[in-house]
Image: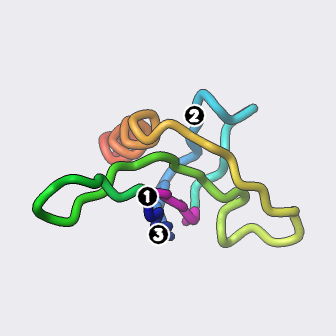
Amino acid sequence: MPVRTTETTVIFKRPFTLPELEGPQPAGTYRLVTDEEEISGLSFLAFRRIGTMLRLPSLATSGRPEQMISIDADDLAAALTADGENK
């Protein structure tokens, strides 16, 4: 099945944590990579997410080696919601 990869950014206004990370990460803009596979057998084009990865550190942080951490998309959504609620 064909796989597509998209890269977007997410912005955290405050430090955040995710279960897959070893500790809190600083606020900032982070690159998010999503892999999706095509769902075959449908009469229209559709994709299902098969992986979500967060690139560390944030784009504003320099001098640290970059890592890509596989994360749960639901955990990320919850962290972004919590970040927006803490105004």
Q: CA distance from mark 2 to mark 1?
A: 30 Å
Q: Which image quadrant for residue 30? A: bottom right
Local secondary structure at mark 3? strand
- Please give left or right for residue 28 compared with residue 69 in the image: left
Image mark count: 3
Amino acid type of the residue tagged 2 in the rendering: Leu
Q: CA distance from mark 1 to mark 3?
A: 16 Å
Badges 1 and 3: C-beta atoms under 8 Å apart? no
Q: Is residue 21 above or below residue 49?
A: above
Badges 2 and 1: C-beta atoms under 8 Å apart? no
The residue closer to the viewer here, 26 or 52, is 52
Q: Position of residue 78 (x, y in %)?
A: 38, 35
Q: Which residue is mark 2?
A: 18
Q: Which residues are magenta?
A: 29-36
Q: Which residue is mark 3?
A: 6
Q: Position of residue 56 (x, y in %)?
A: 71, 56
Q: Which residue is at 50% across, 67% downward?
A: 5
Q: Quadrant of the N terminus?
A: bottom left
